[in-house]
Image (cartoon, helix red, strand yellow):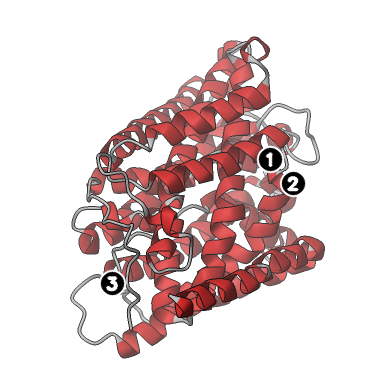
């Protein structure tokens, strides 16, 4: 039986069209990874071809997940994304634990990471110290975009579309400059000296490179959280997921080809990463030879715009999860309150902004993100697996249906299990902490159950 909505809630306005939906997909996926991941992937995979193959494999796996979410989003085009999918397919407490983890840890940490990344790279073309320092700039960015999203959702969606278009143009422009300006011998060097062997593909390093690429693709699940505000959601949610992920895949492969075309494999593999924290990013190394010192400012600006687009998309979509939970009586009722003029969940946005600001100011989000990465894939797998139950009990359905069912969701679930096993093997402490953070939501869920019984 469906739960009654909170008396203080009202429906959200369907102010987003197909363009804004695609922008949310592209904008929340492409953040900082396109500029930074090439370095660590080169270190792990061992050759340019292996790196590009890792991107292709990650794109294929992400597409499978997006196809699962496309059918789920077409079946349930409501605010809340995975929370709605999980609640429809599994016991309520599973959906609650997802929302608990997402709102209090996952979303604020991601927003803070984008804000701090943007503040850090803005030093390439702004005097950050004169503005109060990195922490002040990061917190200010969180609140600027939180306030933007407190207006009508069409306004936040238009900002998202503009930022996404700008980042696509900037990244495409950087790649074009490299391809046009680099000497022809760079192509010969790329083909002759990159040292590819099929043994690299079967190595553990290749699996770790795929894992790194999958983190760069993370975010394809965000747009369905705002499905309740997308016009003709049953049709536009799956279309936007598929089109958006296709554009992202083309951009990732094109950009990485450009980075390796503009700089040697050795230069890319020693770019900014955990192993070389003080080095320049891969994209900066690739472009600096053609634009000189100005290349640092250009890449820094592109990085900042990309991070801001991802942050705006995360702010817009993530606030819809506690809104949906509150409507079901699983979160405080005031999270479901919608401003009568803007018709967006303002309280949810403001609380989310406070959490993200604290993390951005203290810089403690990196460790939290490591904890949540593991837990996120638990819920991705559960959502995709829920398709089997929903198809069995759902009856007639005229929306989008995955082709090659059940192979695609089965393969995606197996891939998610593999990723979790990889994460446990490489960082068992973070995974155990992530599981503990999820478990902390169990007594809170019991309290809401008691409250509903009393009411």
For the point 73% across and 42% down, the residue is 364
Image location (x, y in percent) of residue 361: 68, 33
Residue nearest the viewer, comparing 206 with 366: 366
Q: Which mark is residue 43?
A: 2
Q: Are marks 1 and 3 in contact (CB under 8 Å)?
A: no
Pick out the residue farthest to the bottom.
392
Query: Is 271 above or below relative to 73?
Result: above
Q: Earlier in the sequence, mark 1 or mark 3?
A: 1
Residue 75: image tag: 3
Q: Nearer the viewer, residue 66 or 13?
A: 13
State how far apart marks 2 and 1 are (Cα). 6 Å
Q: Quadrant of residue 378?
A: bottom right
| Position of the C terminus by quadrant | bottom left
Q: Residues within 10 Å of mark 2 (few under 14, many from 20)?
A: many
Which residue is rendered at x = 65% and y = 16% of the image?
132
Figure quadrant of the N terminus: bottom left
Q: Residue at x 47, y 47 (%)?
A: 29
Q: Is residue 238 left or right of residue 134?
A: left
Image mark for residue 113:
none
Quick one: label 1, few (<14), some, or many (20+) residues within 10 Å? many
Label 3 Cα crowd, 10 Å radius (few <14 / some 14-19 / many 20+): many
Q: Secondary structure at mark 1?
A: helix
Pointer 1: what residue? 39
Q: Position of residue 217 (x, y in %)?
A: 52, 52
Q: How many marks?
A: 3
User: Dividing the picture into quarters, in which one does residue 163 lie?
Assistant: top left
Q: In the rendered view, would you say 120 is above or below 71?
A: above
Is 200 or 84 nearer to us in this picture?
84
Which tag, 2 or 3, sits closer to the chain's start? 2
């Amino acid at each position: 039986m469906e739960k009654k909505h909170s008396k203080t809630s009202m429906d959200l306005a369907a102010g987003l069209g197909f363009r804004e939906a695609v922008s949310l997909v592209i904008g929340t996926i492409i953040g900082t990874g396109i500029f930074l991941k090439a370095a660590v992937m080169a270190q792990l995979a061992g050759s340019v071809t292996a790196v590009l193959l890792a991107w292709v494999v990650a794109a294929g796996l992400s597409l499978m997940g997006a196809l699962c979410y496309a059918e789920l989003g077409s079946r349930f085009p409501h605010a809340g994304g995975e929370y709605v999918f999980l609640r429809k397919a599994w016991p309520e407490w599973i959906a609650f634990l997802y929302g608990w983890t997402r709102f209090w840890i996952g979303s604020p940490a991601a927003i803070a990471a984008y804000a701090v990344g943007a503040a850090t790279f803005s030093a390439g073309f702004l005097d950050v110290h004169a503005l109060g320092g990195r922490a002040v700039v990061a917190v200010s960015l969180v609140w600027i975009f939180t306030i933007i999203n407190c207006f009508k959702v069409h306004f936040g969606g238009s900002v998202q579309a503009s930022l996404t278009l700008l980042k696509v143009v900037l990244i495409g422009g950087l790649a074009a400059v490299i391809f046009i300006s680099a000497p022809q011998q760079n192509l010969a060097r790329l083909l002759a000296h990159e040292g590819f062997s099929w043994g690299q593909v079967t190595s553990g390093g290749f699996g770790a490179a795929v894992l790194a690429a999958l983190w760069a693709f993370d975010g394809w699940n965000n747009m369905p959280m705002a499905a309740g505000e997308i016009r003709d959601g049953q049709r536009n949610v799956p279309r936007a997921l598929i089109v958006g992920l296709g554009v992202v895949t083309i951009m990732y492969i094109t950009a990485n080809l450009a980075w390796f075309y503009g700089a040697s494999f050795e230069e890319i593999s020693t770019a900014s990463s955990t192993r070389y924290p003080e080095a320049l990013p891969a994209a900066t190394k690739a472009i600096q030879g053609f634009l000189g010192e100005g290349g640092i400012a250009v890449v820094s600006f592109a990085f900042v715009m990309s991070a801001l687009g991802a942050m705006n998309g995360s702010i817009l979509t993530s606030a819809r999860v506690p809104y949906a939970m509150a409507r079901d009586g699983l979160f405080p009722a005031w999270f479901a309150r919608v401003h009568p003029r803007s018709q967006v969940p303002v309280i949810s946005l403001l609380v989310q902004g406070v959490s993200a600001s604290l993390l951005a100011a203290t810089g403690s989000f990196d460790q939290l993100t490591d904890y949540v990465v593991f837990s996120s894939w638990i819920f991705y797998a559960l959502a995709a697996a829920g398709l089997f139950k929903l198809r069995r009990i759902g009856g007639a359905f005229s929306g989008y249906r995955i082709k090659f069912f059940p192979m695609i969701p089965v393969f995606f679930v197996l891939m998610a299990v593999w990723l979790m096993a990889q994460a446990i093997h490489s960082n068992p402490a973070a995974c155990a902490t992530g599981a503990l953070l999820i478990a902390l939501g169990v007594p809170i869920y019991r309290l809401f159950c008691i409250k509903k019984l009393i009411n």
